Image: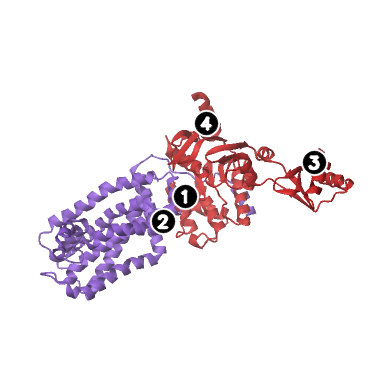
Chain colours: A purple, B red
Amino acid sequence: MSTTTASLTSTDSPTVRPVPHPGDGLMWAIRDTLAMTWRNLTTIRRVPQLLVFAIIQPTIFVLMFRYVFGGSIKIPGQSYVDYLMPGIFTQTCTFGAISTAVGLAEDKGKGLLERMRSLPMARSAVLGGRVLADTTRNLFVVLLMLAIGTAVGFRTHTNVVMVALGVFLLVLFGFALSWIFALIGLSVTNGEAAQAAAFPLLAPLVFASNAFVDPANMPGWLQGWARHQPVSAAADAVRACMVTGGPTATKVLTSIAWSLGIAIVLAPIAVRRYRRI
Amino acid sequence: MSNVERMSSTRSNAITADSLVKHFGDVHALNGVSLHVPAGTVLGLLGPNGAGKTTAVRILTTTLRPDSGHATINGHDVVGDPRAVRRSIGLAGQYAAVDENLTGRENLMLVGRLNHLSKPDAAARATELLAQFQLSDAGNRPVRTYSGGMRRRLDLGAALVTHPPVLLLDEPTTGLDPQSRSDLWEVIGGLVADGTTVLLTTQYLEEADRLADRIIVIDKGVIAAEGTASELKSRLGETTVVLTFADSVTAGKARDALVDMHAASLPTDVNALAIPLRGGPATVREALNILESASLQAHHIDLHEPTLDEVFLSLTGANT
């Protein structure tokens, strides 16, 4: 390292000229968020195992429900695989949001958040970049699951625009849930703890829903929850967009309202939590 | 301190802290710590684990708000104008970090972009820093393939992306092997020579001794001692010659013979004596001559430097 000292004496390199600062400008918040999004997406690309596992899990659910349980589940008026797949898409986005909690908890545990917090970057950018990267990842996984669904017999019965609207609703729902999981990720100290904290929250949302079965066969006390909770609202809206068609507006708006409601309430709370770790 | 005085002292001091207090529940992490670091100098914050060093650094880097007290970096208040503070500092060490899945170059570019350098500037600066820290060959490899020493160098490089006038190093060499440690010391020494103001926390007396102009010993959230390395050392104890004898009777006789040289029994060993090494090697010769003329023979001779443990014991009482 003896040469290092000598080279360090040449300070004031022409390259170090931070751009004059307009303060908390929205422009900087967007730029910082995009820089963090790039960083998180790069990480996902560098550790492809994580993405593979994210795809294997819902694929197993598809195979299980399509071929093992599916024969015993009757949905009046449509084939079970057409009922199932929108539920699988919703489940995929819901579980996908866990990666927001895991990613943030790991950054916190490894000290990366501490460095970010000492930089003159926008306070919202670490969370925003995390959520945007996970949303991008969700979009990718949903499109892949659409292909896998098609391979096992799933068919859309509407048109391309409605199917795209369905994908948009899914991604929006995942985006909203990511803010809940951002809050969880900031409250624990490592990835395993984040995972452990996330599951009890997700199980009643994903399984006590209409994602896989018709709530009509559930006990009465559970039906009210299973019909009206956000996962069911999302699955309903996606089914209407991709499969059943008909009067979709109410279902779509209900799902959008859930997603926006969750994001609008949780995002500021999560950013506030980030400021005060 | 009047406002006028505070302003003028702020101007010459790159870092000031005034009665910082931070409690976490019942844990009093900082209990009224004041310090100032004149521009271009190095302050070593020396203390054991849990002394409050990291809490102090976190307050100075704006990532933690003090319960009370004030602190400034380059004249900017850490609570009142955190953005200006963040633009003036670089942070590295045990609690700062680099992303394992990005390459060294990508890490430096990300920090540059988040410091709002343009893309070409961030890229050029990353190339410069990789060369300075001898990481050019490894620059395009993911950091997870780096050794511990390489990671710390990259981490320090990330703190230097914007040439910050003030550098906060939180235990920069903890956990490193001796070679990597002395490499890093050389790098930090070079930065100091360039006029960077540094606040360095460490558990190692040797590190503070090597790098710091002034040292503050901190324990249980309060300042236990303050001064230059040599001031502290002379306060904290002297190098002694330890002579060990066959039995306590011989040791007692020897103590009487060496009374003019301030010989004292060791509380830990009745067979041993300690003599302050005030005259350098001549002290040893003189002591041995006196023993020989008294027909007493030492079994064993040893030099004893004050250790950091003893420093803490003497400064903070025996209850650490």
Residue lying at 67% horizontally and 40% vertically, measured from the top left? B236
Q: Which mark is residue A190?
A: 2
Instruction: Tell whether A212 sits left or right of B41.
Output: left
Q: CA distance from mark 1 to mark 2?
A: 34 Å
Q: Nearer the viewer, mark 1 or mark 2?
A: 2
Q: Image height check: is A213 above or below B284?
A: below
Q: Nearer the viewer, mark 2 or mark 4?
A: 2
Q: Are marks 4 and 3 on the same chain?
A: yes
- Judging by the rendered image, the residue that carries numbered circle 3 is B279
Q: CA distance from mark 2 to mark 3?
A: 56 Å
Instruction: Tell whether B274 sits left or right of B88.
Output: right
The residue closer to the viewer here, A25 or B15, is B15
Chain designation of label 2: A
**Would you identify the image quadrant in which residue A252 lies?**
bottom left
Of the two numbered discs 4 and 1 on the same chain, state the one appearing first in sequence: 4
Helix, strand or loop at label 3? It is loop
Q: The residue under label 1 is which amino acid type? A: Asp
Q: Which mark is residue B121?
A: 1
Asked if the residue at tag 3 contacts the one at tag 1, i.e. Cβ–Cβ closer than 8 Å, the answer is: no
**Would you identify the image quadrant in which residue A143 lies?**
bottom left
**Would you identify the image quadrant in which residue A207 lies?**
bottom left
Q: CA distance from mark 2 to mark 4?
A: 40 Å
Chain designation of label 1: B
Asked if the residue at tag 3 contacts the one at tag 4, i.e. Cβ–Cβ closer than 8 Å, the answer is: no
Instruction: Tell whether B57 sits left or right of A38.
Output: right
On the image, the x and y values in percent for residue B275 come to 77, 43
Chain designation of label 4: B
- Judging by the rendered image, the residue that carries numbered circle 4 is B10
Q: Are marks 2 and 3 on the same chain?
A: no
Q: Image height check: is A91 above or below A65?
A: above
